[in-house]
Image: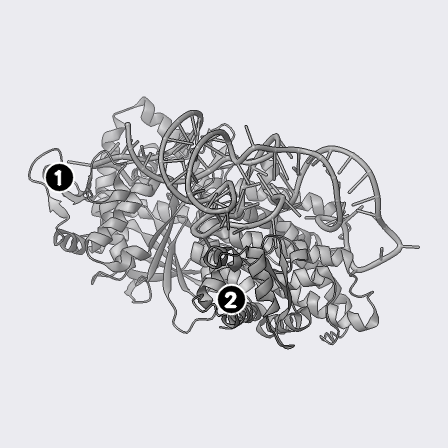
Amino acid sequence: MVYPLMILKKQIVSTIHESLKKLDINDISETIIKDSIEETPDYAFGSYACTICFDLAKKLKKAPREIANTISNNIVFDKDSFIKGIEVAGNGYINIFINFDNFSKAVIKDISKRGNEYGSIKTSKKTKVIIEHTSVNPNKPWHFGHARNAVLGDTLARIMRAAGYDVEVQNYIDDLGRQVAISVLDNIKFKSLNDKNLKFDHWTGLRYVEINKELEADKSLETDIETIIKDMEEGGNKTSVLARDLTEKCVFAQLQTAFRMGIFYNLLTWESDIVQSKLLEEATTILLESKSVIKEREGPNKDCIVLKLDKEKSMEGMYSSDKVLFRSNGTATYTGKDIAFHLWKFGLLKKNLKYLKTMKQPNKQDLWTTNNNGKKSSDFGHGDIVVNVIGAEQAYPQEAVRIALKVLGYPHFKNYIHIAYEHVWLPEGKFSGRKGTWVGFSTDDILDEATKRALVEIEKRDKSVLSDSEKTKLAEAIGIGAVRYILLKTSAFKKITFRWEDALSFEGNTGPYLQYASVRCSSILKRVKKIKSNLDVPFVKKEEHQLIFEMAKMPETIKKSAYMKDTTIAATYAFNVATLFNSFYNNVPVLKAEKAEVNTRIALVEASKTVLDNMLNILGISVVDNM
RNA sequence: GCCUCUGUAGCUCAGUCUGGAUAGAGCAUUAGCCUCCUAAGCUAAGGGUCGCGCGUUCAAAUCGCGUCAGAGGCGCCA
């Protein structure tokens, strides 16, 4: 796929390459020149700079500046080129100035032609990526740390779709764990009722805190929990049916939070279905064929099936280089199950899961779930790349899965990616589901508060044209945009300390700032009765050039963001575009411009709106038309 | 003990992968800008031993080694 910036870069490289050839320097390839091209720190230095002269200095035994001058004297470019001129600067930089007369037209035409596809990459052959995120225990509401996981995963999914991947989003439901067993115990033994009609996940989450206190006091309850876990694992009994019923209710309640944030999934994968489907048995057979997986006959891991990790450098921090996959009683450990599950994700098992369509999500997309009463399908799984958004504390078990794929001889291990994110903290410490420190900081609470505060801001402004319900809807879009953005703009590996004033700020580098820039575009465009934008007059203002250059970078930014699996790249880019647009907006009149300039500037505003809105969509932040 | 991550302005963070020009934002502080397209905005100013040391390099926040501080991890738990 070709876009103007790509052409510009090629022209820069070949122009310099040609001039080097003229000077009889023939061993510098275009790739080397390409790598020496960088963005300038300031508009005054042009748009790109070439640092090749620093590399040539040693070889030619001349000063870089001198070489730069020689090159610049031998440079030739034609009038239709996107390059306007070059200048030698500093110790030997070759600064490249863009011919904005030509380049601007090409960029704006390209944006206008592609519309809401602008910035996205079209690929002929789609690579399938499975992104697993959220995966919150199904017995409590999301606290803000869970929202971070989900927003990171959802945004990565949006970025990778834009980058041309076929993305399948899965939410793994651990419905066989101890946490669920404890909630089941609460139901059986204490028969507690949701008599205040709380949202189901909040109710069960609060009960979970209470029942943990009971567990502290009465250790004999541990026996009950063990029995429950065993029944749930076996399936086909009263307890397992009850557990599935409770967890489904809880997951459904959690999904309401997700939907509110614009987070959607393709498939819910239930651990109980994975166990029932006998994926594990098939995986065990495959694993035992590997020399690195053995059944221990003696030692501390007698009768266990273990994965030998002693040759792996990445596992140096482990006390023991043996990772138990199946316990001496034959049951699978977490890592054992995870390996089987990932063999399935990559389509490496013959056995498959069964699926049911469970609901239509608010984005009109079907949500599927694994279910043993469902039907077979080859639509799910079979990923070329697997991305797991999982806490950084799980780095070792994640690495163990990757190594298992490697020792089994599957090249897929290279495409197994753990997005390790740090947790959200409260100033006083970690969130704890068990201790209930999340109370008051559930994602639902925070979204409510964000909406409330956005509404206060709306009321400060004259919004008499809006009805109350429209105001509420707008407040929700702004509040949630702010919350999503704060989770996106910070690198995943940095700890976030939650503070209301940070999370719910609507000024500066925030979600609403981006939305506001888009609203300003709409506001101008609304006033234009018949849009008759054209590109007859060249753009001459610095503000215009900088905005156009920035907008031209969207395709490569999306590509990089997807490649790096990094949401901050996309977030920072969106902020840059918005900042440059606001600067243009404040310093360059559009509707009040000289007559000849009005139409070209409208074209620029149209293009800006396209880019801003496309970026908002990729970040999962609502586009609004009034603020 | 070993492994991983983090340390950049008063605060919160980009920039580190791929070394490049005076280290950038936002918040907070200070001074301006609404008879002119929505001020959730714009234009400026002040504010920095890029944790510290040594090394590599024409050039280091960025690469290497060491060191200090904080967080997480190293189970037949999940």
Helix, strand or loop under label 1:
loop
Going by the numbered disc 1, the residue's amino acid type is Ser
Depth check: give the residue in front, A98 or A120: A98
Q: Left of A202 or right of it: where is A272?
A: left
Q: Quadrant of residue A454?
A: top right
Viewer can see residue A393: yes
Q: Quadrant of residue B37?
A: bottom right
Q: Is residue A278 above or below residue A326?
A: below
* Residue found 34% across the figure and 26% down from its top: A214
Q: Are the residues under badges 2 and 1 in a single subunit?
A: yes
Instruction: Give the chain letter at badge 2.
Output: A
Instruction: Give the chain letter at badge 1.
Output: A
* Residue found 26% across the figure and 38% down from its top: A316
Query: How would you rate the neighbour count of disc 2 (Cα within 10 Å): few for under 14, some for 14-19, many for 20 or more?
Result: many
Q: Left of A475 or right of it: where is A250?
A: left
Depth check: give the residue in front, A627 or A253: A627
Q: Earlier in the sequence, mark 2 or mark 1?
A: 2
Q: Is residue A517 above or below residue A599?
A: above
Q: Left of A359 or right of it: where is A334?
A: left
Depth check: give the residue in front, A213 or A520: A520
Going by the numbered disc 2, the residue's amino acid type is Ser
Viewer can see residue A195: no
> Residue A546 at x, y = what percent?
66, 60
Query: How would you rate the neighbour count of disc 1 (Cα within 10 Å): few for under 14, some for 14-19, many for 20 or more?
Result: some
Which of the labelled discs sits on residue A120, or is there none? 2
> Residue A46 at x, y = what percent?
64, 60
Q: Is residue B29 above or below residue A594?
A: above
Helix, strand or loop under label 2:
loop
